[in-house]
Amino acid sequence: MAEKGLRYSFIGAGFLLIAIIMLFAAPAPASWQLGFAMLCAAFPLLGSGVAKMLYVRRYEQRLAPGSVETPKLAGQSVTQLPPRNTSEIAQPASITEATTKALKVPADDEN
């Protein structure tokens, strides 16, 4: 993510440099239009690049060794647990069985 932030910052700086060159080197009627267009591309790229780099820096500081303590597991370790009995796995109920039971009409005893 830091590489993406650095890439966006360099692209934005390139657009900013081109905008400044265009303001001084381009012909008069088009210089302000092209310069403004380049500035509109430069500032969002510069801003997002700097924001991504700051985000990565804060994220790395938060994950620095010693700053986060892992909780200790209480109780038995995995090797001390008894083995599971997987030979008797219950079969799930059928979808149609539950529907049939719900829709079954009771028989009339009056004949």
Image (cartoon, rainbow, N blue to C red):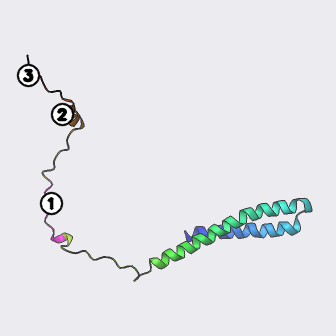
Mark 1 → mark 3, Cα distance in angstroms? 49 Å
User: How many neighbours does mark 3 have within 10 angstroms: few (below 14), some (14-19), or many (20 or more)?
Assistant: few
Residue pictured at 17% horizontal, 27% vertical: 105
* Residue ID at (21%, 38%): 94
Which residue is tagged 2?
101
Q: Which amino acid does label 1 sit on?
A: Arg
Three-letter amino acid code of the residue under disc 3: Asp
The Cα–Cα distance between marks 2 and 1, rounded to whole angstroms, is: 33 Å
Q: Residue furthest right?
A: 28
Q: Mark 3 points at which residue?
A: 109
Mark 2 secondary-structure assignment: helix
Q: In which quarter of the image is residue 63?
A: bottom left
* Nearest to viewer (mark 2 / mark 1): 2
Give the mark, 2 or 3, whose residue is nearer the N terminus.
2
Q: Looking at the image, can residue 48 be seen?
A: yes
Q: What residue is at 59 percent from the left and 67 percent from the top?
A: 4
Q: What element carries label 3?
A: loop
Question: Going by the image, does 107 lie left or right of 53?
Answer: left
Q: Quadrant of residue 106?
A: top left
- Check residue 84 in the rendering and tell me which mark sits there, or answer none: 1
Image coords of residue 101 (percent x, y): 18, 33
Q: Does the magenta stretch include residue 82?
A: yes
